[in-house]
Every structure is written in structure tokens, then in C-alpha cells.
Amino acid sequence: MKKLSSRFFLIIATSVLLLSCTTSKKILHSAVTISSIKFLNAYEIPYNMQYKNTTVGGLSGIDYDAGENVYYFICDDRSDIDAARFYTARIVLNNYKIDSLVFTGVHNLLQSNGLAYPNKKQNKLQVTDPEAMRYNPKTKTLVWSSEGERIVMPGDTVLINPSVTNMQTNCKFINSFQLPANMHMQAVEKGPRRNGVFEGLAYADNYKTLYVSVEEPLYEDGPRAEVVDNNALIRINKFNTATKKAVAQYAYKLDAVAYEAKPSNAFKVNGISDIMSLGNNKLLVIERSYSTGRLPCTIKVFIANLNAATDVTGITLTNNKNFIPVNKTLLLNMDSLGIYTDNIEGVTYGPVLPNGKKSLLFIADNNFNPLEKAQLLLFEIIE
């Protein structure tokens, strides 16, 4: 989801001497218990920064390969500025702070035919809208999601289904996941909404499961979130990574939009911007709320427990009480930190800290907008 609204030194190099190299080699596969998260530091990537003839921005997803100490950042540029792409980087921590971010590569996302994605002027029916990315260390491959497109206007209808794609780290297409029927774009008001689809990805069950979250409610599942609680429900899809097929869907209730828009009829949104597995059928969930007239976003981090949730595959959620939604517990409302928080769209486990504690890193998508910040937020996990 692009936020609609009215940089710290960065070192670019191909190699650096990193602190905490020995501890950062460990990757978190087992279940993680989180009682709270402690804010440590905010780092800002300069606006309009150039790297290898591309503009760095729109970073809407982050993941960490601890074995190689490499971070993956997917960019949500629809090939309008540069070709749809992702970046690799290294992050240097020093004394519990982000010392520097070192970009090490940029790679174009490729279609199944091996070609880069066009922009809407080149071919409006083949445009992609990248949002999330995860690395699988078992297969040494990447999975990424696109929100697709839905434009329904007299004389101009564009329907591109959202997608979840497996590819090699060199961007060679492997295969795509098979979407449930209710995840297909339609010309009528049924199925996903424009720009409110696959924002979150999370591997689980030793990479046998992939959870894919929908940012906003499907048309048939009820209204979008408002400033008052209106029981807005989204779906979390559960896929089998071997068959690439969905095996379940779970209903998740969104919080209300945090602030009224100014004017009140202007754009506002609350939805899931990313998810991450904690093990034992639990997810870390980011809800990101934005309202026109207010630059900061309200970012809430929840622990979602799917164990008792009903599989709602084939069930319409509107005016339906015959299911159990995902149980969620608030871990942190970032408004309480007293810092500026922008359009947080990605989260990953970071390196182990010098005190032996695990860390989390959040990334904010600046939408290539000078009024917004491409932030990295570092947190310590308190178990």
C-alpha cells in the first residue's frame, strides 16, 4: 500500500568489516518467545539516494540471510522510476545502534519469460507491484509478492491478479503459488481491493508453510477499516510450499484507523503491512495506519495466534459469527515511543546483539516522496 501524503551518512561499498560477525551467522528457525520489544535506534536512508544508476526508495520489504550476513530489500517501484527490483545490503551495528547501511547489489525482478517488468506506459497488462520478500536458506531461493492491479473505469479496465513468486537469487523465475479463487481480481466488487492485497509474507514450519497476508478486507468480507471499530476483517492465507497450493485461510480483525483524516472524507487506511513467523502457529503482525493530513503513521505490532482460529476457506465473513478469528495481542504501539514513525512496511529478525539478545529490524517505505522517510528501526527482543 502506498501512503498518500502532502536523510546520517550512507557508505556504499562492496565489502566492509562488520561488527558482531560471529553472532550474526546464526539464523532463527526455532520458536521465538517475545514478551516485549525495546527500541534502540532509528537510521534514515537519504532521500533520492543513487546506487548503480537506480534511485533507492520505496523499500517495502526486508529479510535477513544470517548465514551470509545479507539483507534483502524489495522495492515497490512499478518500473516507473527504474525497473522493478530488489537490493542486497549489509548493515553495521555499533554499540546497539545502526552505524551504516552498505548496499551491495541491485537486481531486476524478472517475468517467467526472463524479461524485466514493464511500466504501465510500456504494457499496462504486465505491470507488477512488488511488496514483500523472504529468503529461504534451505533452498537458497527468494519468494516475493505483488499486489497486482485493479482499475475499473469506463473504457479502461485493467485486472492483474496478485501473485506470489519463487525465484533464484539471480532473479530467474522458478514457479508461482496457486491462488485461491477469492484472491483473483474481478471487475465487479468481489475479491481483493486495489492496492490492498499481498503485503506480508512469512515462512513457517521449517519452510514447509508460507503465510501470505492480505492488507485490507476483500469486498465480500466487509468494509475497509474506519476511525471507529467496524469489525474490518482481512484474510491470512496459508500455503504448502511443496504443492504451492493454499491449505487454509484465517480471519484477522483489524484495529480502527488511528486518526481522522483532514478533511474527514480524505484517504485513510489501516491494514497489515507485513507478517513474520514466531513459530508454534504464531505470527508477528504489523498494522500500519495512515490518515491524510498527518505525516506520521501509527504502527502497531501484534502477536497473532492462529491455533484456535477457524479455517474460513469458502466462508464469507460479512455478518457471519460462525467462525473464530485469529487471536491477537498488542506488543507495541510505536506512538508510545515518542519518535517519528513513517510508513513501516517490513520486518525481519536482525543479528544477535552484543548482549546475546535477538533483534528486530523494521523498514519504512518512503514512496519516493521527499516528505517521507526511509527509516530503519532497530529493536531488542525481550523474551
Image (tube, rainbow, N blue to C red):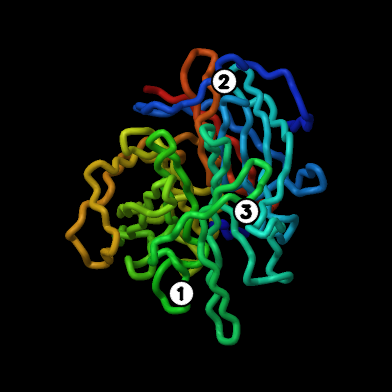
Q: CA distance from mark 3 to mark 1?
A: 23 Å
Against 162, residue 273 (above or below) is: above
Q: Position of residue 197 (x, y in %)?
A: 47, 59
Q: Residue at x 68, y 50 (%)?
A: 85
- Circle 2 packing at 10 Å, graded few (<14), some (14-19), many (20+), is some
**Residue at the extreme right:** 53
**Which residue is under mark 1?**
186
Q: Nearer the viewer, residue 372 or 61?
A: 61
Q: Is residue 258 left or right of residue 19?
A: left
Secondary element at tag 2? helix
Q: Amino acid at mark 2?
A: Lys
**Residue at the extreme bottom:** 155
| In front: label 3 or label 1 | 1
**Which residue is under mark 2?**
25
Against 155, residue 256 (above or below) is: above
Q: Amino acid at mark 1?
A: Gln
Q: Is residue 372 left or right of residue 236?
A: right
Secondary element at tag 3? loop
Q: Residue at x 27, y 44 (%)?
A: 327
Residue 147 visible to the viewer: yes
Q: Position of residue 110 (x, y in %)?
A: 67, 54
Secondary element at tag 1? loop
Q: Residue at x 64, y 43 (%)?
A: 374
Asked whether the residues under the numbered discs 3 and 1 touch, taking CB atoms below 8 Å apart as contact, a structural biologist would say no
Against 299, residue 245 (above or below) is: below
- Circle 1 packing at 10 Å, graded few (<14), some (14-19), many (20+), is some
Q: Amino acid at mark 3?
A: Asp
Q: Nearer the viewer, residue 240 or 192?
A: 240
| In front: label 2 or label 3 | 2
**Which residue is under mark 3?**
76
Asked whether the residues under the numbered discs 2 and 3 touch, taking CB atoms below 8 Å apart as contact, a structural biologist would say no
- Of the numbered discs 2 and 1, the one sitting upstream in the chain is 2
